[in-house]
Image: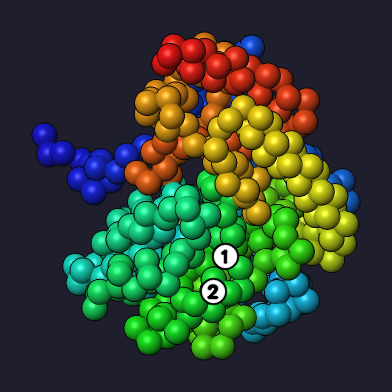
Amino acid sequence: MRDPLSATTVALKPSGIRKFFDVVNEMPDAISLGVGEPDFDTPWHIREEGIFSLEKGRTFYTSNSGLMELRKEIDAYLSRRFNVSYDPKSEMLITVGGSEAIDMAFRAMINPGEGEEIIIPQPSYVSYEPCAILAGAKPVIIDLKAENDFRLTADELKAAITDKTKILVLPFPNNPTGAVMEKEDLEAIVPILVENDIYVLSDEIYAELTYTDRGHVTIASMPGMRERTILINGFSKAYAMTGWRLGYACGPSNIIAQMTKIHQYAIMCAPTTSQYAAIEALRNGDDDVAEMRDAYNQRRRYLINTFKKMGLPCFEPFGAFYIFPCIKEFGLSSDEFATRLLMEEKVAVVPGTAFGDSGEGFLRISYAYSMEALKEALGRIEPFVNRLRENKQ
């Protein structure tokens, strides 16, 4: 019988996050710090708007691009928060989460069989590399370094560029490291991108979750970059709306038009109920975002201080809700360390290698959990770390 499977798909590795997530589900006394999902409920006024949309019978398809009312609100939001504006009619697409937007952007821009390259800094979100491969591109990996606080440098970018480079993925604020790119960091790479005529997929899903006084800066707001940037964002992280599955892409109209065509055939439109809820989030959700961000920041500081007391090296993350401690001193791989921690102390974390080979020697720990859960988990991690040190002596 003929093999029914795609060799390209079969060759993809399963997500390294799911492995530990599935195991911990079978351990009722385990604590998981592995999932990148807010522990907050979606704010009530946002849920209420979704409920109201159902009560009003708004259960129809929207346009492929999404509700015009929502697209206008997104433009107003981006203008006031990040100093960048898009035409809601032609430069914006509402998607089923940010991940769909990433996949569609690659497929809309890459010509399979021509050897076009997508530069992907790692450690980073697990979807970029597989989506690049499925689109027919060659992924080119830049291994970000702890000594640079896992930021992309101009020298690293220059070294990765070839005449086949078409897209740079800019995954900041970063999952899993919590790294951010400040304005000066972006200014250093902009001339390189313009000179080499490279497009940018800027994944800004954590844009609202930054902990510096300056806040998030989008590369799309910089001279010469709006016309070569596809800005990806959504509602999952900032508004605690992961299950609503709603994101958006903004960018040049010619690229958005082709993404919309793919979306039209594969999805039709994003969930209607979610779109009405998102309108309410953008109009009246600023205080909710600030409250959740303050809570994450408190947890962030607690983890930084606690890991410092444990003697585990960890640079200070200024974005997202992850911390990326180094465990190289123990001579264990990230996978071995995470597996033993789960089996011996019933605490689930994610090996850094789930986010690329450069994550070896690190762990991703999410602080999108209650302070109570974090204290209990770190109370289990500390004796585990102490035992490993004693056994080395």
Q: Residue most toward the left?
A: 1
Query: Can residue 49 be spotted in the picture?
Result: no
Q: Residues within 10 Å of mark 2 (few under 14, many from 20)?
A: some
Residue 391 coordinates in the image, percent (x, y):
44, 11
Secondary structure at numbered mark 2:
helix
Taking the image as shown, residue 274 lies to the left or right of residue 115, namely right
Query: Can residue 233 be spotted in the picture?
Result: yes
| 334 relative to 340, above or below | below
Secondary structure at numbered mark 1:
loop
| 340 relative to 359, above or below | above
| 338 relative to 358, above or below | above
Residue 33 coordinates in the image, percent (x, y):
61, 30
Residue drawn at the location 71% of the way across and 42% of the way down: 300
- Total number of numbered discs in the rendering: 2
Q: Residue most toward the front?
A: 393
Residue 208 coordinates in the image, percent (x, y):
71, 59
Residue 297 coordinates in the image, percent (x, y):
76, 46
Residue that numbered label 1 is attached to: 181
Residue drawn at the location 54% of the way across and 20% of the way down: 385
Pick whichever, 14 or 362, lies toward us.
362
Taking the image as shown, residue 143 lies to the left or right of residue 327, namely left
Residue drawn at the location 87% of the way across and 46% of the way down: 44
| Callouts 2 and 1 close, C-beta under 8 Å | yes
Residue that numbered label 2 is attached to: 186
Dividing the image into 4 quarters, which one contains the N terminus?
top left
Between the C-alphas of marks 2 and 1, the distance is 6 Å
Label 2 vs 1, first from the N-terminus: 1
| 252 relative to 365, above or below | below
